[in-house]
Image (cartoon, rainbow, N blue to C red):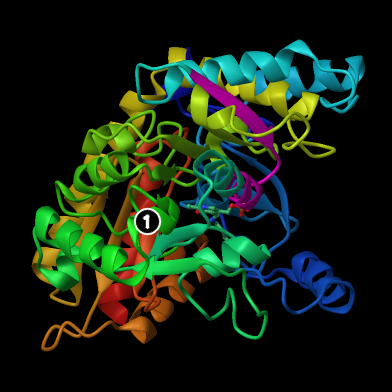
Amino acid sequence: MALLDTDAPALPLGGPGLPQERRLITDLPGPRSAEILARKADAVPAGVGHTVPVAAVAAGGGIVVDADGNSLIDLGSGIAVTTVGNAHPKIAAAVAAQAAQFTHTCFMISPYESYIAVAEALNRLTPGDFAKKSALFNSGAEAVENAIKIARKHTGRQAVVAFDHGYHGRTNLTMALTAKSMPYKSGFGPFAPEVYRAPMSYPFRDGLAGSEAAARAILQIEKQIGADNLAAIIIEPIQGEGGFVVPADGFLPALSEWCTANGVVFIADEVQTGFARTGHMFASEIFGVEPDLITTAKGIAGGLPLAAVTGRAEVMDASHAGGLGGTYGGNPIACAAALAAIDVFENDGVIERAQQIGRLLSDRLRAMQAADPRIGDVRGHGAMIAAEFVDPQTNAPDAALTAAVAKAAIAQGVIVLTCGTYGNVIRFLPPLSIGDELLNEGIDIIAAALAAS
Ligand code: PLZ
């Protein structure tokens, strides 16, 4: 039905029947949001920041509504989470039905079918035609932690390699895996040991072919760690927080082949790229790799907290009984939401919509780039596209320009996120329920902000 019908006048997807239009009736924040944010400053520590100075009260389609009745265009999906749209009716119904049935038993105490059904779906949908198993957790960071535990147990080795610009979370082990110090790590150490960093393929900045970048990384790994000591390498097929860095062709397959040849577990962190975001169910498919383990979260359950590790059955089974788990992992409400979301991903044309959005975004951004050399690079796949801002003379990152453009767009009611090691990337992660009109209006506003900066 109207899920992906972009001609629908309102509410293509989700929620409380919201008109699909940007509408500012106050400056941002309006008085009600300002009051709520003042309470935030008193009650919530400063370390928990926010990007958009409004308090949300409703969201659906491509719109977020704030406490003063302003409607903002959503180009962020709450960091790549509400891929099927916010408050999707199928998810809202599944959540309500499950909440009325039971909210928790703890899967480790009294298992239930929906967890198993989510595991079966993940085993079927992830790349690789081999026997797989899945374990469920609550957050992306928790999935990453567990993937590393599983890889260590399977290999009997300790070292783990992550990559320049990589992001894997904010817990102690995942801080160690994450590359960027500010704001994620600074002052929060000491970090988990036996974590090493290898150079990433970043075609815009290193100019290397995928095979060259892989040879560089592998040489460093062999010389500085040694394959015999290495349990796993973990990599985002397209880096998220690090700047939507798309590795050169051949980079990921070469790493994956080296891992296989050396008994190292190849872990793809698809927390941000997974579930149709890139115009494929998983980004690993774009590069033709079949990871041993895949971590997922974010888009998996339409906004409910759920995460997973999926992978080769013999690797996943390495842990002794009782070695994996957690009180809430695979909570029944989150599993009900995931089953509803997976139904939408498989049956409602979501992947095709991500590809359409990708074409629209990259066409528009490339046209802007042709007219303005401060856009050094446009890259990404599907509804995960970014523009990198630079000084056109030197290609040096221009974080100040990036921040100014994002701030101006947000002030006009467009929720847009930045990213990148150098803070000079604007990323587009719209919900796939957004209509073309809102998407174009959002880009128009960003283009005008750039022209004025
Ligand atoms: N792996 C690839 O993108 C989360 C974090 C934003 P959690 N990215 C958004 C922030 O500032 O905290 C992410 C990711 C990749 C792991 C994670 C961690 O997922 O669900 O936030 O723990």
Neighbor class of circle 1 (other Cα within 10 Å; few <14, some 14-19, many 20+) is many
The kind of secondary structure element at disc 1 is loop
Please state the extent of the stretch shown in magenta in the rendering.
132-146
The picture quadrant for ligand 1 comes to bottom right
- Find out whether residue 134 is within the magenta segment: yes
Quadrant of the snapshot with the C terminus: bottom left
Q: Is residue 421 left or right of residue 364?
A: right
Can residue 82 be seen in the rendering of this structure? no
Q: Is residue 122 above or below residue 216?
A: above
Can residue 437 be seen in the rendering of this structure? yes
Q: Is residue 271 above or below residue 61?
A: below
- Find out whether residue 216 is within the magenta segment: no
Residue that numbered label 1 is attached to: 239
Disc 1 within 8 angstroms of ligand 1 (CB):
yes
Residue toward you, 4 or 70? 4
Residue ID at (47%, 58%):
160
